[in-house]
Image: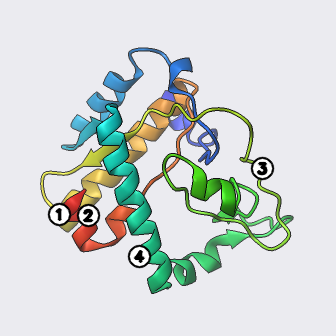
Amino acid sequence: LDLLGAVSRRRTDRGPLDATALPSGLPFELQTAAAAEGCSLRLVSSPGDRATLSDLVLRADRLLQVRGEAQSELAPWLRASGDTDRDGVPGNHTRGSAASQRAEFVQRDFSTVGSSPEQDRPGVDRALVAVLTTPQDRVADWFGAGKALGAILLRATLAGANASYLNQPIEDVAMRAEL
């Protein structure tokens, strides 16, 4: 029931995140939630691993921009200011293009024309970064990953944490394998 109650409170936050403010046991709780769905949540904490992942996210982001498919798929989901649809991404829920590109991990920019980037706030990024993995790369594994992601996000919400995504590498088969 607690997890169900967290559904309406969970939000994606593309601004700076600070893992030092989280309960110390939360990473292990999130790993346990992933394992319950047959997945692994691998923490990315060493400077070298973070740099490697950051480079992969940047390369995948550039590849997706060059292809243009991701942006055209995303366009119908972007919501302008005043749009009352509950689905999609509000255009102001972003850091803005420049801040998204200079973050430690490149963020997708969801800005819409005339929107102001509400999540471009001061603060140093000290995010808890993790990669959710599956035993294989099959449809059943994707389904398990979705269930695990839902459990992870809701448990994080219950702990007072916000989350964001670095999903660019999983959208390309070769980069997903590299990840």
Q: Is residue 121 left or right of residue 171?
A: right
Which of the 4 image quarters holds residue 67? bottom left
Q: Which residue is mark 1?
A: 137
Query: Marks 2/3: CA distance?
Result: 30 Å
Neighbour tally class for label 1: few under 14, some 14-19, many 20 plus, Cα within 10 Å: few
What's the residue at 19%, 51% (across, down)?
A: 134
Foreground of the two, 147 or 48:
48
Residue contact between numbered discs 1 and 4, judged by CB atoms under 8 Å: no
Q: List x then y, in percent, for residue 138.
A: 17, 66
Question: Which residue, given by chain and number where applicable, does mark 3 sit on?
Answer: 118
Amino acid type shown at disc 2: Arg
Q: Which residue is mark 4?
A: 63
**Which amino acid, mark 4?**
Leu
Q: Where, by quadrant of the figure, is residue 115 drawn?
A: bottom right
Residue designated by label 2: 176
Q: Is residue 125 above or below residue 171?
A: above
